[in-house]
Amino acid sequence: MTLTEVMAELSALEDPKVRAVNEKHGDDHGVNLTKLRAVAKRLKTQQDLARELWGTGDTAARLLALLICRPKAFDRDELDVMLREARTPKVHDWLVNYVVKKNPHAEELRVAWFADPDPVVASAGWALTTDRVARKPDGLDLVELLDVIEAEMKGAPDRLQWAMNHCLAQIGIEHAEHRARAMEIGERLEVLKDYPTPPNCTSPFAPSWITEMVRRQGVK
C-alpha cells in the first residue's frame, strides 16, 4: 500500500467516541488500537513506509509507523529527533518501549535523555533506566537514583514524575536491599497516593505498588 492509501484507511477508522476518550489522556487520535494493530499485522514490516507515516506528523500514522518499523534500522540521531517530536503520551510510550529499547543505541540514548532539561525527554531516560533496574542493573548506582528521586520527584512535571515514580517502585520491587528506603521515600512524598485506581488494579502509589508486586512474585 502507498502512504496515501494507508492514510485513507486510517481516516476511515477514525471514531469520534474513541477520540474523545483519548483526548482525556492527551492523545489526539480516534483510531481503535485493536483495529490499528490489525492494519499493522496486514502491512507487516515496512521500514520505508514507516518513515513516511512518521513524517506526516499524524498521531495514528505515527503509532502505525512504530508497529511496522524495523527498530534496529534507526540511527541514534534519528531516534533522538523522533523522541523530541513525540509529544503525545501514547506515541512517546510506544517509541520508547517498542523501538528504542530494541535499538543498539538504547543505552547511549538513556544516558543522554536522563539528563535532558526537557522533562518529557528526561522521562524517556527514566523509562529506559527503569527497564535497566529490572533487567540489567549492573553498573547503575541505585543509591544515587534514590537520592535524585527523593530530591526531585515531588516537584517534577507530570510525565517526568510518573517515570521517576515507576523507577522508585521498580527499585523497591527488584532490590530487597533498597526496599525499605524506596518505601520510606514513597510514603513521605505521597506522590500518586490518591490516584484513582480501578478495582482489581494495582495502585501507582509506590509503597502500595511495591508491596503488591512483592506479594505476587514471592520476592524475598
Image (cartoon, rainbow, N blue to C red):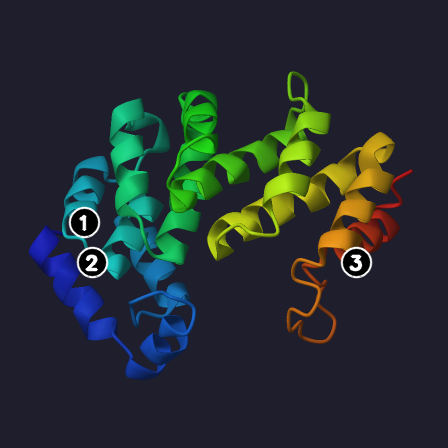
Q: Nearer the viewer, mark 3 or mark 2?
A: 3
Please tell me whether residue 197 is drawn above or below residue 135 in the rendered image: below
Q: What is the x, y in percent for residue 160?
A: 50, 48
Q: What is the x, y in percent for residue 96?
A: 43, 41
Tag 2 residue: 58
> From the viewer's perspective, is 183 left or right of 73?
right
Q: Residue at x 84, y 47 (%)?
A: 214
Q: What is the x, y in percent for residue 67?
A: 35, 47
> Nearer the N terminus, badge 3 or badge 2?
2
Question: Which of the 4 quarters of the picture holds residue 212?
Answer: bottom right
Tag 1 residue: 53
Q: For residue 208, which numbered disc appears in the image?
A: 3
Please tell me whether residue 38 is drawn above or below residue 81 in the rendered image: below
Q: Residue at x 63, y 48 (%)?
A: 165
Amino acid type, residue under disc 2 in the picture = Asp
Q: Are marks 1 and 2 in contact (CB under 8 Å)?
A: yes
> From the viewer's perspective, is 209 left or right of 83?
right
> From the viewer's perspective, is 66 left or right of 113?
left
> Nearer the N terminus, badge 3 or badge 1?
1
Q: Nearer the viewer, mark 1 or mark 2?
A: 2
Please tell me whether residue 196 is drawn above or below residue 81 in the rendered image: below
